[in-house]
Image (spheres, grey):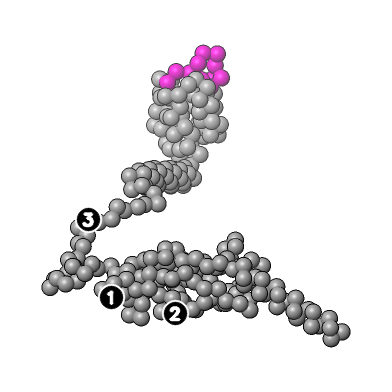
Amino acid sequence: MAALRVLAVAAAALALGGTAAAATTTLTPASAPFGDRITATVTAPGGVRPVADFGPLAVLSGPTRTKTGYSWTVACLSEDCVPGTAPRRIVLPPVRVGSARAAWPVLTITSRVSTADAAKATPPFRLETRLPQPSYRVAPGRLALALDTLAVALLLGAAWLLARELRRRHRKREEARLAAMSPLERALIFAREAESRGPAERRRALGLLARVLGGRDDRLAGTASELAWSAQKPSPEQVESLVGDVEREVGPR
């Protein structure tokens, strides 16, 4: 059993050592100005997660899992790595992969200001005089057209609802007015309106007037009934004449 444990430990050590030996490191770019982003990548077969120390560099993000290993985004942002009159070479601490270590390529940090510019009493600065080109999720012209169309649709919808409400209120007022009238008054109004309509409407109006007049004025009721059911179509003049006689002789009630 002891021999088996020794063999297992040795196999694990060999496996870790093999993984570390197969690991590779890259810095992209290997030479960058002060403040620029640098991508540090470790290729670690077997899924072993490396442990990295980037010394004077600031870690902006990571570690991020990739298809072949892990990556970080780093940058020189402090005085510990700022270059002087000449580019500064930085040797990062080795990255630990399993039980072994892998060295990083040498990183060169260059200055963003030339020696001639730095020697001037007033260093030149780049002045941005143009605004950046704006970007839109939806083009302003297309959005304005869509909003105008929506506004017109809402206006038409509001007008339709208002007209519908006005018609409803007018109908209710007419129903209330007719409900307050006597049957004879309603029959006379129906007959007046039927004068400008077809013969069938005039016949129905005269028939209604005959039924309402029954018991109140048999002569006028008979005249209305004869006009309603005569072979000859009742004319508007006949209806108007009869309505006038009823209003004069019987009254609206």
Q: CA distance from mark 3 to mark 1?
A: 32 Å
Residue under pointer 3: 130
Tell us which disc is closer to us: 2 or 3: 2
Residue 244 shows in the view: yes
**Marks 2 and 1, the one that precedes in the sequence:** 2
Q: Is residue 242 above or below residue 140?
A: above
Q: Which mark is residue 159?
A: none
- Residue 224, can we see it? no
Q: Say whether residue 126 is left or right of residue 73.
A: left
Point 57% across, 76% down: residue: 101
Lower sequence index among marks 2 and 3: 2
Mark 1 residue type: Gly
Magenta stretch holds residue 59? no
- The amino acid type of the residue labelled 3 equals Arg
Q: Which residue is identified by label 2?
A: 55
Residue located at (35% from left, 70% from top) = 109
At label 1, counting other C-alpha atoms closer than 10 Å, the crowd grade (few under 14, some 14-19, many 20 or more) is few
Q: Nearer the viewer, residue 107 or 177?
A: 107
Q: Which residues are magenta?
A: 226-236
- Give the distance between the C-alpha atoms of the residues marked 2 and 3, in whole angstroms: 39 Å
Looking at the picture, how far across and down is residue 208, in whole percent? 54, 30
Q: Earlier in the sequence, mark 3 or mark 1?
A: 1
Name the foreground residue: 14 vs 235: 14
Q: Quadrant of the N terminus?
A: bottom right
- Depth check, mark 3 against mark 1: the one in front is 1
Identity of the residue drawn at 20% across and 58% down: 129
Q: Is residue 4 left or right of residue 77?
A: right
* Residue type, numbered disc 2: Gly
| Residue 45 picture location, percent across and down | 64, 66
